[in-house]
Image (cartoon, rainbow, N blue to C red):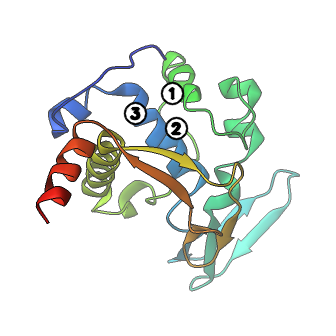
Amino acid sequence: MSDVQEIEDYSPENLARTRYFDAVLNETLRLTPSLYFLPRRATADTLMTTADGRTLRLPQGTHILLDVWHANRHEDHWGVAVSGYPAGDFAPERWARLAEQGRDSKEILHFGFGHGPRVCPGKHLGQLEVALVVGAFVKMFKFRAVNRESSVKAGVSTKPADGTLVDLQLREPYEAAANLVGSRG
């Protein structure tokens, strides 16, 4: 993706034009979904056919856990043959390749906010808020991960095991403003 651009105003309108930034956020959500599993319950007796042709009966009331973590890393849906990149790798460029194929997240297993009629009603607001916070953070700070690899801690939600340790440095003009405030002190 070559639409790297600087934006001064992190408004919803400007964020809508930042395709690579959006791809980075989508890729982050794909690999670190807010929920490890999505719980559901069968509302009616349901018959399913497995990949090997067997029939599976889910009685009404059966609790079902949709495995978001592994689905978002499944090679058949996210891997090299589909996106050009291994499913387990962080590769925001995969989103441009999927878009070139005419595919979007509604067709593939990217369901960190749920899917269909039960999708999280706060999905778009949550994505906008994250984009605004991350955009402001990137604008104000230079940062570097302390650890090259970040293992995850799975639970009800997924979190980095180390809390995502980073070294921060204020960018100009924020550094000058902080020095000015500090010198008045």
> Along the polypeptide, which appears first: circle 2 or circle 3?
3
Camera-near label (1 vs 3) is 3
Q: Nearer the viewer, residue 58 or 159?
A: 159
Give SS at disc 1. loop
Which amino acid type is marked by label 3? Answer: Phe
> Does residue 102 appear left or right of residue 10 in this picture?
right
According to the image, label 3 marks what residue?
Answer: 21
| Neighbours of disc 3 within 10 Å: few (<14), some (14-19), many (20+) | some
The residues bearing labels 2 and 3 have C-alpha atoms spaced at a distance of 21 Å
Label 3 sits on a secondary structure element that is helix
Residue type highlighted by circle 1:
Arg
Asked if residue 77 can be seen in this view, the reply is yes
94 sits left or right of 74 in the view: left
Q: Is residue 110 visible?
A: no
Residue 103 image position (x, y, % from top left)? 51, 27
In this picture, is 43 found above or below 172?
Answer: below
Residue located at (53% from left, 75% from top): 40
Mark 2 sits on what residue?
107
Tell whether label 1 touches label 2 (CB within 8 Å): yes
- The residue wearing badge 1 is 103
Q: Is residue 1 above or below residue 109?
A: above
